[in-house]
Image (cartoon, helix red, strand yellow):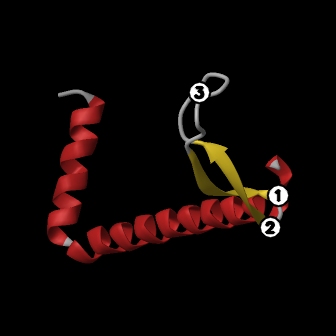
């Protein structure tokens, strides 16, 4: 039996005897994932704030040739893009 197989068997036995260990690992992993998601969300919000307030602009909805009537739509774009 390889070292990895032996370690996996010991781990399964330990978790079967002590389910609280498994739950502690699950809670720890859940907290780590929640912290990572929170940090990423904060970084996205900060990046969005750097772009500034939004501005309403009119843009063409499709390509057109000179003389064709314009088909436009209203969009909200960050002020940095206007």
| Residue at image coords 85%, 52% | 80
- Does 29 appear above or below 2? below
Looking at the rendering, which quadrant does residue 22 occupy? bottom left
Q: Nearer the viewer, mark 1 or mark 3?
A: 3
Q: Identify the secondary structure beneath mark 2.
A: loop
Q: CA distance from mark 1 to mark 3?
A: 26 Å
* Residue found farthest to the bottom: 20
Residue occupying image coordinates x 29% and y 34%:
4
Quarter location, residue 41: bottom right
Secondary element under disc 3, as helix, strand or loop, is loop
Side (left or right) of 46 relative to 27: right
Residue visible at 62% across and 59% down in the picture: 40
Query: Mark 2 or mark 3: which is in front?
Result: 3
Label 3 belongs to which residue?
Answer: 64
**Marks 1 and 2, the one that precedes in the sequence:** 2
In the image, 6: left or right of 58? Answer: left
Q: Residue furthest top?
A: 65
For residue 79, which numbered disc appears in the image?
1
Residue nearest the observer in this picture, 17 or 75: 75
Question: Quadrant where the N terminus lies?
Answer: top left
From the image, tell me which residue sits under label 2: 53
Residue found farthest to the front: 67
Q: Nearer the viewer, residue 1 or 58?
A: 58
Q: Is residue 19 left or right of residue 78?
A: left
Crowd rating for badge 2 (residues with CA inside 10 Å; few <14, some 14–19, many 20+): few
In the rendered image, residue 3, in percent from the top left (x then y), is placed at 29, 32
* CB atoms of marks 1 and 2 within 8 Å: yes
Q: Position of residue 64 (x, y in %)?
A: 59, 27
Please report contact status of discs 2 and 3: CB closer than 8 Å, yes or no: no
How far across and how far down the image is residue 39, in percent? 64, 64
Which is nearer the eye, 32 or 41? 41
């Amino acid at each position: 039996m390889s070292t990895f197989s032996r370690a996996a068997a010991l781990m399964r036995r330990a978790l079967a005897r002590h389910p609280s260990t498994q739950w502690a690992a699950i809670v720890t992993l859940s907290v780590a994932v929640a912290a990572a998601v929170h940090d990423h969300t904060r970084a996205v919000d900060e990046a969005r704030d750097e772009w500034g307030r939004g501005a309403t602009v009119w843009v063409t909805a499709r390509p057109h040739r000179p003389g064709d009537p314009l088909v436009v739509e209203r969009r909200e774009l960050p002020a940095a893009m206007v």
